[in-house]
Amino acid sequence: MEKFSYEKNGYKKSDVNKFISQVIDETKRLIDIIKKQEVKIDEMTKELDHYKNIENDFTSAVKQMEEAKESINSIAKKESDLIIEEAKTNASRIVNRALIMAKEIDLYKEKYKKEVKRLQSIAKEIEQLNID
């Protein structure tokens, strides 16, 4: 801190005025710095708000995508279960029809065996008649 020179009635006026002028200049400089910092703070606050909005939008979009994914997975699971159930039903129906057809084939086979035996018997009789 500066020391003032003494005059007859106190401190030397020019020293005091010089000091006051320095204090005023420094105060103006500090006020200017503070104003600039306030402007910068306002700008940064607006920028931060902008990024917070982007973050909120992004968070909301991620949440919507997760909900959509869960919904799609649920629908896909239900559809796959339905497809599997239909396939089982169709497979059962096919197997049952195949079993019925197999039984019918066995019946025809037995019937034709009997018919072949009968015809063979008739053929033998005719042969016997032709021989006699």
Image: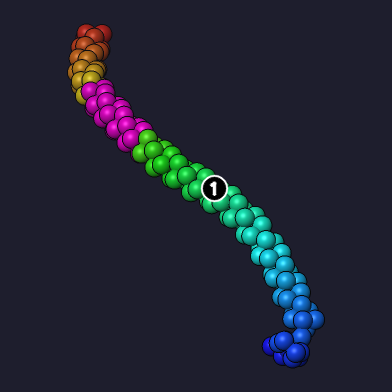
Residue 92 visible to an observer of this rendering? yes
Q: Is residue 63 left or right of residue 119?
A: right
Q: Is residue 26 left or right of residue 66?
A: right
Residue at 64% x, 60% y: name it.
Answer: 38
Quadrant for residue 7, please give it. bottom right
Quadrant for residue 5, please give it. bottom right
Q: Colour scheme of this structure image?
A: rainbow
Report the predominant secondary structure element of the magenta stretch: helix
In the image, 49 versus 36, the foreground residue is: 36
In the image, 16 versus 108, the foreground residue is: 16
Instruction: State the image coordinates of residue 40 (x, y, percent, origin top left).
Output: 66, 59
Give the vertical position of 129 relative to 43 (above or below).
above
Residue at 27% x, 26% y: name it.
Answer: 93
Residue at 72% x, 71% y: name it.
Answer: 24
Quadrant for residue 115, please give it. top left
Give the vertical position of 56 relative to 14 (above or below).
above
**Which residues fall within the magenta stretch?**
77-101
Would you say residue 60 sits in the magenta stretch? Answer: no
> Mark 1 Cα within 10 Å, few/some/many (few <14, many 20+)?
few
Would you say residue 97 sits in the magenta stretch? Answer: yes
Give the vertical position of 109 relative to 23 (above or below).
above
Q: Is residue 68 left or right of residue 2?
A: left
The quarter of the picture where the N terminus appears is bottom right
Residue 22 visible to an observer of this rendering? no
Disc 1: which residue: 53
Instruction: State the image coordinates of residue 60 (x, y, percent, origin top left).
Output: 47, 44
